[in-house]
Amino acid sequence: MKKIQMVDLQGQYAKIKAVVDPSIQEVMDSAAFINGPKVHKFQKNLEDYLGVKHVIPCANGTDALQIAMMGLGLEPGDEVITADFTFAATVEVIALLRLTPVLVDVDPVTFNIDIAAIEKAITPKTKAIVPVHLFGLAADMDTIMQLAKKHNLYVIEDNAQGIGANYTHTDGSKTKTGAIGHVASTSFFPSKNLGCYGDGGAIFTNDDDLAHTIRGIVNHGMYKRYHHDVVGVNSRLDSIQAVVLDAKLVYLDAYNAARRSAAQKYSEAFKGYSHIMTPSGKTECKGICNTCDCHVFHQYTLTLKGIDRDALVQHLQANNIPCGVYYPIPLHKQKAYEDERYIESDFTVTNQLVKSVISLPMHTELEDDQIEFITKTIIDFIDNNA
């Protein structure tokens, strides 16, 4: 059995090396390192893949989220609602722009933002909602968009973990996550489902005027050299990262299918164990169906019941099995984001999840014997400790 890795980027690279290496050499030979033709080619290909009018590449996923908010013209003091159970970058950019973060609880099955909690949190100062497609599962976008329309709010999709996922609307039609809200952001951090070999990100929108504004923001506020029409930043995707992403984009659906297959094998092995809640698609799903395209399994995350999570982490590490706890501390309890407005009874799900979730190795190169070893090690621990 090969060494088990949380993410196997070396194995993935080996399969696309023959495409990636010559593409990087082309960039080196051309010396078109910033905003070169390779960036524009990737941008167009990603627009076609997502079915979105505008993709604006930038330097990283955190910048993407910040720039999306800057483009909307949100002002200091405006309230932005997002999930308490997610990576800090989501709330970080809200605070950086001197907006007011409003954290709310999540659904215990999907881990995504709780719709009832959003509605409860809306005030006259609320200007935007940031749903996070956490761990690769599409949030309930139809309901969120309806709620936003009712209250005249912007929706900013945080698609850093969900690229390639399909959202099935109530009428049965499908749209890629990131192409539903008023604007969306994503990260191309190496471990993402579509990741580069450095930092990278992008903003998506179907709004022509907003896209124009954002294109200026990412480039120092310039549309014409040395003419600064808006307040901007320096955030651009370099050409080397663009060719890596373009090479991988061709395989993104296959990568996500491999992740989904691994997730199914994990869940099948844990079937019947009451101490383990396996991830599924929507709240009403009983598992991972063969057409479960709403989830791309950026992470495969278990919720443990009556099991010492931290002891299991130590057991897995002792058996050379990497794992992750995403996330160990709620955002509303982080020193940087504490606020006297928050009431602990409003975060019952998040406060429980941070004590009971554990994420297993998940990537495109997982092999059956590795999955079998991982699941057997966990089951043996549960049998001995439940």
Image (cartoon, rainbow, N blue to C red):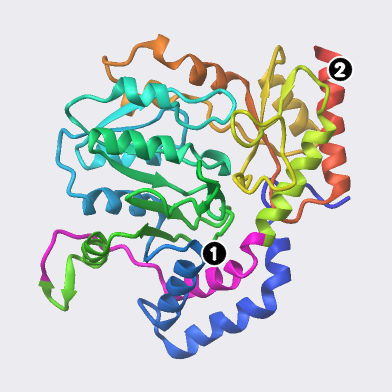
Assess disc 2: are there few (<14), some (14-19) or many (≥20) residues with their C-alpha within 10 Å of its C-alpha: few
> If the image is split into quadrants, where does the C terminus sit?
top right
Residue at image coords 19%, 60%: 232
Residue bearing the label numbered 1? 197
Mark 1: amino acid? Tyr
Q: Is residue 211 left or right of residue 289?
A: left
* Residue 250 lies in the magenta stretch: yes
Q: Secondary structure at mark 1?
A: loop
Residue at image coords 48%, 69%: 48
Question: CA separation, marks 1 and 2?
Answer: 41 Å
Residue at image coords 11%, 66%: 229
Q: Compare residues 236 and 347 and report the one nearer the observer.
A: 347
Look at the image and give the residue range highlighted in magenta. Answer: 228-253
Residue bearing the label numbered 2? 383
Question: Furthest-top residue in view?
Answer: 345
Q: Is residue 13 above or below residue 168?
A: below
Task: Give the quarter of the image for residue 276.
Answer: top right
Q: Is residue 174 left or right of residue 35?
A: right
Residue 273 % position (x, y):
81, 21
* Residue 249 lies in the magenta stretch: yes
> Quick check: can you spot residue 182?
yes
Q: Secondary structure at mark 2?
A: helix
Q: Compare residues 103 and 23 and report the one nearer the observer.
A: 103
Residue 202 % position (x, y):
40, 60
Q: Is residue 110 above or below residue 97?
A: above
Mark 2: amino acid? Asp
Q: Are marks 1 and 2 in contact (CB under 8 Å)?
A: no
Which numbered circle lies on residue 59? none
**Viewer-nearest of discs 1 and 2:** 2
Q: Is residue 298 left or right of residue 124?
A: right
Task: Give the quarter of the image for residue 156.
Answer: top left
Residue 275 % position (x, y):
75, 17
